[in-house]
Amino acid sequence: MISAEKTFVINHLLDLVGSYISLNDATMLLLGGYGDELKICLSRECSPEKIHIVEKSPGRMRKILRGDFGAVCFAGNVNHAHEMFAAMYGSKASIDYLHLDLCGALDPVEHALYSLMKLSVKSRGKCIAITTADQRANRANSDPDKIHKQSQELFDPYAENIWNSLIDLHTFVRATWNGTEADPNKVALRELSIYNHVALTCGLGNSQVFAWPDRLERVIFSSGGFRMRTYFFHIDGNERGMQQKQAREYFAELIHKAPCYYLISNQLVRVPPRKRRKDSKNMNRMEEIASLRARFELVLPVMSNSVQEDLLRLFELAEMDGVAEAVNKMEAALEEIKSESSASSASLNEAQKPVKKHPKKKESVVLESDGAPTFTPITVSDDMVLKDKVRLSLLMAGSIADEDGRQKALDAASIRAAELLGIHKLQNQADVLRGIYARSQGKFRAIFVARQLLQQPEGQLRERILVKLAKYYGERAEIILAEAKTTTLWKNAYSQS
């Protein structure tokens, strides 16, 4: 059964296609699968006789045919789809919308992209979408030198700018699987491989560039527990073509400026593009503060730790210009990033929370037990660390004063928690998360607080964590500390000298 996220993305792609040509008039070529995308297209009043399905699995093709949807069906490999179009329509063959919805990477069907690109350029719609799995084997990661060399040959002298742009994006946007952050270099390599294929297909590196995208949009989403990425291209082109030098610059600028969206709770959250360093020199301080603040505030649910450099720059600028509001909004996020630099602070990985505009001055709390005890930070199982991440994330979201903001934060935190825990069935998510969250409330609060504090050595870091937990609970720090000290875990962690 198709996921709600995948349904959203397919409808979004149809909206984009509809901005270029009426869906009722569009000639489409889709991969068959189980017929889910076909059903969505028909529900959007696309003409069944203009929808062409190619499916190499006889079983799946029989299922589509039994549905009697009225679409034109090809049994075979998508690499031969252009031959079928030529046989049916001759020189008039064209495709307004092509969606290569792949189970893995683009590499196995690269020949199909080349032949079908020519049919797309001849059409009125000129829309191509490519959906790839982010967690399957990919040739790009097995031979990165080849991908970089190919990119250098295609995009020189802009290849380095393109690579830096992709690294920046995928360092900023967290891609996770079972709680482990993906390597941004590998993710960027997979995306760079897509652009290499598209550029080659358009004729870059050959005698003539006969086509080029004039629009690129990227969507990152999770479907059935798997990270997916969809790339939408609108293609332009003419008989005169484009000069190689001009095309290289054109492609580099398109990739750098292309919007990237992260699908969260059926909403597309745009990742604001990072200003190029050479551009940022020409911006005044207030402009840069506004740019950085917008970047952080829009994507807090998917922020990764590596944005520390930008956060530090934000505070440096804000302090010089006296922008107290910016400091207040991002203070909590900065504290969490600092704490994550400690080897023992994994349990606060997800606790990134903007604080209120006028926070009260933090009170200093003495954390050491009476009698000058000796102490060694405790270790916690990986399973408990993961569940504590979820508890902290939900606590943080639930402490937001604004009702609308609190609900949005809780929705985003729940989606993130389900990803971390590998909960793929929607009907199970609420019960599991409710049970995990309950272990930070009521009689369990003391042991939860103790566990967070005892993973840190005594000192300022532990004090900051205590103050933050007090904010989440809406309680005085001294009270929750006193509760924590009554637990067996606390008493066992300390031994009288």
Image: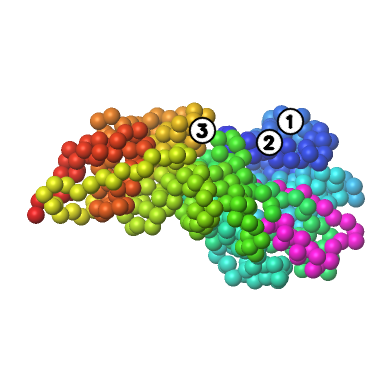
Q: Amino acid at mark 3?
A: Gly
Q: Which residues are magenta?
A: 230-256
Label 1 SS: loop
Please name whichever residue, 411 or 193, is drawn nearer the observer in this view of the structure: 411
Residue for point 77% across, 44% down = 97
Residue under label 1: 44
Relative to 420, residue 168 above or below: below
Label 3 SS: helix
Residue 489 horizontal/vertical position (percent): 19, 43
Side of 384 relative to 56 (left or right): left
* Mark before the other along the chain sequence, 1 or 3: 1
Coloring scheme of the render? rainbow
Residue for point 36% across, 37% down = 471
Q: CA distance from mark 1 to mark 3?
A: 33 Å
Residue 22 makes an appearance in the image: yes
Side of 115 relative to 222 (left or right): right
Residue under label 3: 405
Magenta residue check for 255: yes
Residue 217 horizontal/vertical position (percent): 69, 48
Q: Are dots 2 and 1 in contact, CB under 8 Å?
A: yes
Residue for point 71% across, 29% down = 43
Residue under label 2: 11
Q: Amino acid at mark 1?
A: Arg
Q: CA distance from mark 3 to mark 2?
A: 27 Å
Residue 430 horizontal/vertical position (percent): 43, 30
Residue occupying the far left of the picture? 497
Residue 27 makes an appearance in the image: no
Relative to 107, residue 453 above or below: above
Q: Amino acid at mark 2?
A: Asn
* Mark before the other along the chain sequence, 2 or 1: 2
Magenta residue check for 29: no
Residue for point 21% across, 38% down = 482
